[in-house]
Image (tube, rainbow, N blue to C red):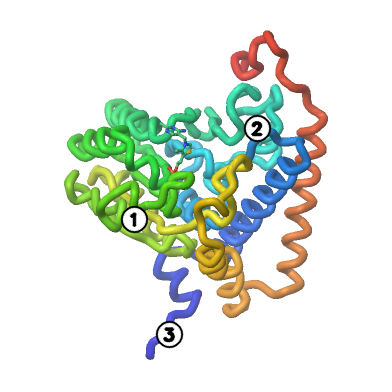
Amino acid sequence: MVTTTLSDRLADVGLADADARTLYRWLLLTRALDERIWRLNRQGQVPFAIPARGQEAAQVGSAYALRPGHDVALPYPRDLGVVLVLGMTPLEVLLSALARADDPSSAGRQLPMHWGHARLGIVSSSSPVGTQIPHAAGIALAARLRGADSVTCCFFGDGATSKSDFHEGVSFAAIHRLPIVFFCQNNGYATSVPLSLQMAIPNVADYASAYGIPGLVVDGNDVLAVYAATREAVHRARSGDGPTLLEAKTYRLLPHTSDDDDRRYRDPAEVATWEARDPLPRFRADLLAAGLLDEPSDAELLAEIHAEIDEALTQAEATATPMPDGEPSLART
Ligand SMILES: Cc1ncc(C[n+]2csc(CCOP(=O)(O)OP(=O)(O)O)c2C)c(N)n1
């Protein structure tokens, strides 16, 4: 039997040991900040939370294949890991969660986690599901017309594929061979609606063949597999070979939002099955086995991350809330 070591896997996808540690740090930071926001919601300080827990590998692995500030990203609200890897700081994330005037996404005017960051190329999002998909196709067309070599990466959940926006955006991008990656995080549910009631085929990626573009299913809880698939799709887009539809199979381990009770539509046994596939302990175990991490340095890293979040929270809490009828500070920057 041939066993593949972590070093082999890293080499296969063009990454070094240092990248593996960096990816792990992003996973940990995403998990810890997500937990903190959830707790702040339970304490009545954050009005609304959209948890990323369970989907961190899909988010971190895909964003790691982009060029931050050069490529354009249209994340969807659950994409905490995407925006962190692209350069949003924990402070900026908390300013959004706490709806503060200095929130770079919307100056505290939007729902929390409706990300936007002009300098980082993160396009402001709207609440209606899937509307970012045709927008992304238009942005990719604009990049082509400008002669830029930027790639547009459009993120969405499986629920968005039930919208005509998905089919219109993918079809248009395919016809014009636009430099775009469509990245679907299929967590099995659109709020309470299971996949079997959203589509009559087993994989979102299967739609790709109807539009004449490559479609690929990837294990969304395997950060290296996600990175490798996205890297290839980004390369294809940047080389002028058109769009790819990637489907990361994953699961959200918490309710849909802080206002949802998932016990009403999910069997706890199903959640437990996916807890056992949690991408974070899985990658940690790989790093420990490969000698790229040890228990003391892991504990140190986690303590450092918690201290970073504590500091960011203290700073965010000290900032002003938006004026009820004043100009959003965003408009002045
Ligand atoms: C057009 C539209 N319909 C319904 C909603 C309510 N809604 C918000 S999120 C969501 C489910 C989205 O599911 P999916 O795209 O799979 O992403 P997930 O939340 O599972 O990560 C729904 C139905 C909405 N925001 N927009």
Which residue is drawn at the image coordinates 69% and 32% (left, top)?
95
The amino acid beneath tag 2 is: Ser
Residue 155 appears left or right of 164:
right
Residue 296 place in picture, x, y as percent? 76, 72
Q: Which quadrant holds residue 47?
A: top right
Relative to 306, residue 95 above or below = above
Question: Quick one: 16 or 94, which is closer to the camera?
Answer: 94
Q: Is residue 329 left or right of residue 159?
A: right
Q: Amino acid at mark 3?
A: Thr
Q: Secondary structure at mark 1?
A: helix
Label located before the other in sequence (3 or 1): 3
Tell me the amino acid under the disc marked 1. Answer: Glu
Cβ of mark 2 under 8 A from ligand 1: no
Q: Which residue is mark 3?
A: 3
Q: Which residue is mark 1?
A: 232
Report if residue 317 is visible in the image.
Answer: yes
Disc 2 packing (10 Å; few <14; some 14–19; many ≥20): many
Contact? badges 3 and 1 (CB < 8 Å) = no
Residue 124 lies, with reference to residue 65, above or below; the image says above
Image-quarter location of ligand 1 = top left
Left-right relation of 327 to 160: right
Q: CA distance from mark 3 to mark 1?
A: 24 Å
Among the 4 quarters of the image, the one containing residue 276: bottom right
Q: Secondary structure at mark 2?
A: helix
Q: Which residue is mark 2?
A: 96
Q: Nearer the viewer, mark 2 or mark 1?
A: 2
Q: With 97 as the anchor, is 86 left or right in this view?
A: left
Point out residue 32 in the picture as x, y percentages from the top left corner.
69, 53
Tell me the mark number nearer the camera, choosing from 2 and 3. 2
Upstream in sequence: badge 2 or badge 3: 3
